[in-house]
């Protein structure tokens, strides 16, 4: 995509953190953006904020949608088409984490992580694939370095992100015959509110959400003959242990 002007992007979990940073970057490039949240008020409020912030009020809407439900994702896709006429980019970003030993992890916590982080990515792609065939679009999933590096207390989160990484790479092979590009981004420590973190100056060493927004822009503008299908992203200089 040489220009992102008037391209239409759907971003799951776009009201904060990485999704918000990507939405802002796309709007600044002239794209039209649909952000989703399980909470309608939050989706609408953040869409309004982003529109004002980027001087693109007519180019962004918020939609209530739950990635855990395929039908909900189909509704979000339909709203994107009804509003902006097409769909070119899907950023499967929505995610959460529960951490703790397998002795303490509950089945409810396990299901919540897997259903959101992994099944949610499946639903986001399944609900939109016919539309992206029309536009020869681009899927970007947000995995994690936890999708290749396991750690104690991370059984549910590791399983979900290992799954996202493998799923995305297989989907890339499935869909490239249609001219659809597929990439997974695997960030390390990012300065967001994830897992109760509070962004502050102390986290200046971390990856910032605008950095990931820039990576997405760079991917979308990559020469179409070239596909970076899996990208690991780390802070340059983490604190010494």
Image (cartoon, grey):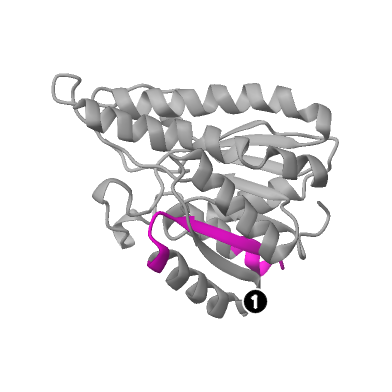
Q: Is residue 170 above or below residue 44?
A: above
Number of marks in picture: 1
Q: Secondary structure at mark 1?
A: helix
Residue that badge 1 annotates: 58
Position of 218 with respect to 223 (left or right) is left
Q: Residue at x 14, y 25 (%)?
A: 104
Observer able to see residue 191: yes
Q: Residue at x 81, y 51 (%)?
A: 1
The magenta span reads 25-41
Q: Position of residue 83 (x, y in %)?
A: 67, 65
Position of 99 with respect to 4 (left or right) is left
Q: Is residue 144 above or below residue 189?
A: above
Q: Looking at the image, which is closer to me, 38 or 137?
A: 38
Q: Looking at the image, which is closer to me, 154 or 40?
A: 40
Residue 161, magenta (yes or no) = no
Q: Position of residue 236 (x, y in %)?
A: 48, 43
Position of 135 with respect to 147 (left or right) is right
Residue at the farthest left position: 104
Mark 1 closeness class: few <14, some 14–19, many ≥20 residues within 10 Å: few
Q: Position of residue 166 (x, y in %)?
A: 55, 21
- Identify the image quadrant of residue 155: top left
* Quadrant (top left, top right, bottom left, bottom right) of the C terminus: top left
Q: Position of residue 182 (x, y in %)?
A: 68, 35
Observer able to see residue 233: no
Q: Residue at x 72, y 23 (%)?
A: 174
Q: Is residue 71 above or below residue 80?
A: above
């Amino acid at each position: 995509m040489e220009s992102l002007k008037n391209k239409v992007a759907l971003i799951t979990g776009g009201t904060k953190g990485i999704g918000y940073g990507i939405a802002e970057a796309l709007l600044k490039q002239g794209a039209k953006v649909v952000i989703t949240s399980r909470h309608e008020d939050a989706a609408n409020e953040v869409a309004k904020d982003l529109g004002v912030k980027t001087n693109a009020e007519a180019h962004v809407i918020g939609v209530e949608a739950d990635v855990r439900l395929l039908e909900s994702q189909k509704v979000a896709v339909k709203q994107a088409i009804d509003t902006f006429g097409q769909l070119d980019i899907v950023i499967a970003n929505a995610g959460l984490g529960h951490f703790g030993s397998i002795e303490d992890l509950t089945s409810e916590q396990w299901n919540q992580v897997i259903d959101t982080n992994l099944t949610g990515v499946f639903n986001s792609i399944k609900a939109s694939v016919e539309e992206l065939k029309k536009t020869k679009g681009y899927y970007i999933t947000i995995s994690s370095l936890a999708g290749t590096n396991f750690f104690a207390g991370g059984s549910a989160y590791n399983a979900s992100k290992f799954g996202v990484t493998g799923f995305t790479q297989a989907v890339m092979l499935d869909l490239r015959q249609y001219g659809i590009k597929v990439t997974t981004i695997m960030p390390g420590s990012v300065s967001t509110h994830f897992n109760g973190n509070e962004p502050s100056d102390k986290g200046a060493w971390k990856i910032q959400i605008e950095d990931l927004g820039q990576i997405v822009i760079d991917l979308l503008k990559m020469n179409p003959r070239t596909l970076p299908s899996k990208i690991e992203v780390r802070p340059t200089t983490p604190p010494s242990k």
